[in-house]
Image (cartoon, rainbow, N blue to C red):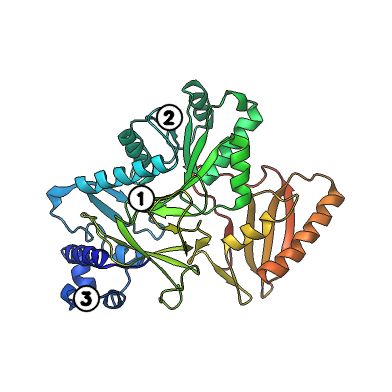
Amino acid sequence: MNMDQKTLEQIKKSIKHAMLSPFYQKHFAGFDVKDITSEHDFLQIPFTEKEDLRSAYPLGLSAVPEEKIVRIHSSSGTTGIPVIIPYTQKDVHDWALMFKRCYETAGITPHDRVHITPGYGLWTAGIGFQLGAELLGAMTIPMGPGNTDKQIKMMIDLRSTVLTATSSYALLLAEEIEKRGVKNKIHLSKALIGSERWGDKMRKRIANELGVSLYDIYGLTEIYGPGIGISCDHACGMHMWTDYLFYEIIDPHTGCRVQEGQTGELVITTLTKEGAPLIRYRTRDLTREIPGSCPCGSPYPRIDTLIGRSDDMVKVKGVMIYPGKIDEMLADLDGVSSEYQVMIDHLNGKDMVTLFFETPVQDDEARKTLAETVRLVFKEKIGIMAKITPVGMGELPRSEKKTTRVFDNRY
């Protein structure tokens, strides 16, 4: 994303505000915002990383007096120390405005009924979907996750037209609706899917089984939550709301900007956030900037569908394995479904990779042939040998939140 003078001034204002927080006072010690006169100067500013934010627990990120904080949200504390993000009333309203824009980009109107399955509470997802839909004027059905029986009953009885979910839970619902034979009672026409990377094969399954148009929605707790970008009807990348944020794409290893169109890690600087402004925050999400204008006519630039995270990649026998690359590999193979798991073990002094994938193929000989095909393609596309194990449809676990696909059991 190119930086013009107006954006540079917004960034300088955001940096000045961020330095009111205890965290950035320490992080930017000895730094003077007056020294930033160009984009080159901006690129000398150190990145902010998730571990930095954990060190600010509980409210070291706050850049406003406590009486201005109206809400907190938190990212998952996988290390035991969560990241606490404070919000002012303006932050909450700005987030709702961005989310409303997401719904409008997807062609959703006040006549729609929005079925919300992401979780509520400290997680940002559910309440973000709700506030944006309410601001739009649509009917909201705040289900939250789980209780699939009730989800489907309410979906039928209340004639929900829009589903919001993780891709994992959308697939679970699609499979249950098909299994129960109630697809003709479902009135869904659109689905906003976010929170995790998902491949084309999974995308097609959800769209076909639910009979919906799909939209990728992007966001993360540290930067408001979901709703800071979304795909449009042309499904050629996600439009990012650059009046609220500035983004960069960097090489995750060197930290340098990549050339336009090249894949790298997304870095975000907030432009208007009050409670917890973030400067050059490394999201760890891997994507690329899509050059040129979108056929939809939106003035907002686009990033591509996420292919994974820079901290998701695992190294086996000197080869870097990205879940997104496995998605791409399986998408081109007939007889292979969207669901898979990769197990990495260390046995008898060697690293071993096992790929489990679901298939509708039931004949034993046909499965053996399919497994051999997958083995050869895995070696060619991923770069290492793997043990291939086909399983029946529905045998791998489903999730109401995010599905873990790669398990590294070596440590």
For label 3, the crowd category at 10 Å Cα-Cα, with few meaning under 14, some 14 to 19 and many 20 or more, is: few
- Mark toward the viewer: 1 or 2: 2
Q: Which residue is labeled 1 in the image?
A: 225
Say if 69 sits above or below 345 in the image: above
Inspect the image, locate mark 1, and give the three-letter code of the amino acid beneath it.
Gly
Q: Nearest the camera: 34 or 75?
A: 34
Q: Which quarter of the rendering shows the N terminus?
A: bottom left
Label 2 element class: loop
Tell me the mark number nearer the camera, choosing from 3 and 1.
3
Q: Earlier in the sequence, mark 3 or mark 2?
A: 3
Q: Quick check: can you spot residue 120?
A: no
Disc 3 residue type (three-letter): Thr
Label 3 and label 2: CA atoms lie apart by: 47 Å
The residue wearing badge 2 is: 112
User: Residue 408: horizontal and vertical position, in percent?
Assistant: 57, 64
The amino acid pointed to by label 2 is Asp
Q: Position of residue 20 (x, y in %)?
A: 15, 63
